[in-house]
């Protein structure tokens, strides 16, 4: 599904409209889902739609989030980590580590809660930043969050690889 102005309007709307909007895409074999937004309100709407996404896109193998807007993005909803039971590849693209942590910290809470393994088939987490002035290394809090997620999953017998990419040519 390509992101456009309609996608942002749908994500910012109420749950009923959002459910109807996503039901338009009930293609039986969709393996990649990309969500791109520069607006925190659209991200909030996307996260709140996790139960609908689980029933509509259960076969997703690749999930890509691109949150390139300025300003803080709200934390991901815990339900997001129960959606996409077939997920193998998860990519987050963001301008800064704070945005990465809006996904990583709730993921830690979900793992510690222990209600489910969250994405038991995950094999690769990619953190990608597109910046012209930033560092290509994670800050301590983000690095600690990733290491904790890896450790928690390893104790469950669910290891994954991490790839961190900094594309200095994009903005």
Image (cartoon, rainbow, N blue to C red):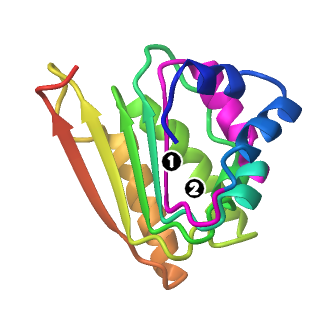
**Left or right position of 130 against 111:** left
Q: Report the magenta residues as a range.
A: 27-51
| Residue at (83% x, 30% y) in the render | 17
Q: CA distance from mark 2 to mark 1?
A: 6 Å
Q: Position of residue 171 (x, y in %)?
A: 22, 19
Q: Label 1, on which residue?
A: 104
Q: Position of residue 117 (x, y in %)?
A: 63, 72
Q: Which residue is most to the bottom?
A: 157
> Is 42 part of what is drawn in magenta?
yes
Residue 17 appears anywhere in the view: yes
Q: Label 2, on which residue?
A: 108
Which element type, helix, strand or loop, lies under badge 2? helix
User: Of residues 84 and 159, which is closer to you in this image?
Assistant: 84
Which element type, helix, strand or loop, lies under badge 1? helix
Residue 69's place in the image compared with 106, above or below, is: above
**Left or right position of 99 against 21:** left
Number of marks in the image?
A: 2
Q: Position of residue 140 (x, y in %)?
A: 32, 42
User: Of residues 106 and 32, which is closer to you in this image?
Assistant: 32
């Amino acid at each position: 599904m390509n992101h456009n102005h309609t996608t942002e309007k749908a994500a910012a709307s109420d749950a009923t409209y959002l459910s109807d909007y996503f039901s338009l895409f009930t293609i039986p074999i969709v393996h990649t889902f990309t969500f791109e937004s520069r607006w925190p309100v659209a991200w909030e709407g996307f996260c709140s739609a996790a139960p609908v996404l689980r029933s509509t896109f259960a076969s997703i193998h690749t999930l890509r989030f691109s949150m390139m807007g300025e300003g803080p993005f709200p934390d991901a909803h815990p339900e997001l980590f129960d959606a996409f039971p077939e997920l193998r590849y998860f990519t987050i693209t963001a301008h800064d580590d704070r945005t990465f942590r809006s996904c990583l910290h709730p993921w830690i809470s979900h793992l510690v809660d222990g209600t489910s393994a969250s994405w038991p088939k995950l094999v690769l987490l990619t953190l990608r930043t597109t910046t012209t002035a930033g560092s290509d290394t994670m800050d301590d809090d983000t690095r600690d969050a990733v290491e904790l997620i890896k450790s928690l999953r390893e104790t469950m017998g669910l290891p994954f690889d991490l790839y961190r990419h900094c594309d200095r040519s994009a903005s």
